[in-house]
Amino acid sequence: MRKIAITLLLLTLTACATTPLPSKPPLPTTEVKPVTETIQGVAITDPYRWLEDQNSPETRDWINRENA
């Protein structure tokens, strides 16, 4: 009984090891549009500030590509 269980376990592990993983679609490229502002004397640069505008056509397009 123990030999059968070990054999089944090994066959299961072998099947799992040889099954290829599904490929994921590539992530969308994200354009860098740096915006620099000074807050309390410190310059802060945000390269992805444009993504904060949820209603912008560019942002909506990026979100749709990300969700795909």
Image: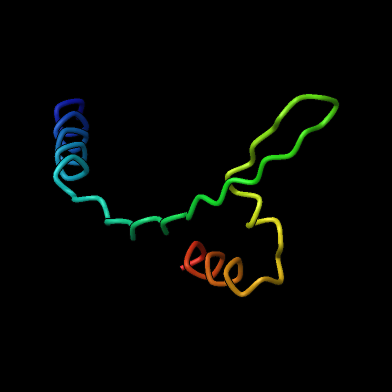
Query: x%, y% of residue 7?
Result: 14, 33
Q: In the picture shown, does residue 10 fall above or below 21?
A: above
Viewer-closest of 43 and 19? 43
Q: Quarter of the image holding residue 2?
A: top left
- The residue at the point 33 percent across, 60 percent down is 25
- Looking at the image, residue 40 sits to the left or right of residue 9; the answer is right
- The N terminus sits in image quarter: top left
- The residue at the point 14 percent across, 39 percent down is 14
- Looking at the image, residue 28 sits to the left or right of residue 55; the answer is left
Query: x%, y% of residue 37?
Result: 74, 39
Q: Residue furthest bottom?
A: 57
Q: In the picture shown, does residue 23 fall above or below 67?
A: above
Q: Report the colour scheme.
A: rainbow
Query: x%, y% of residue 46?
Result: 64, 41
- Looking at the image, residue 25 sits to the left or right of residue 21; the answer is right
- Looking at the image, residue 19 sits to the left or right of residue 25; the answer is left
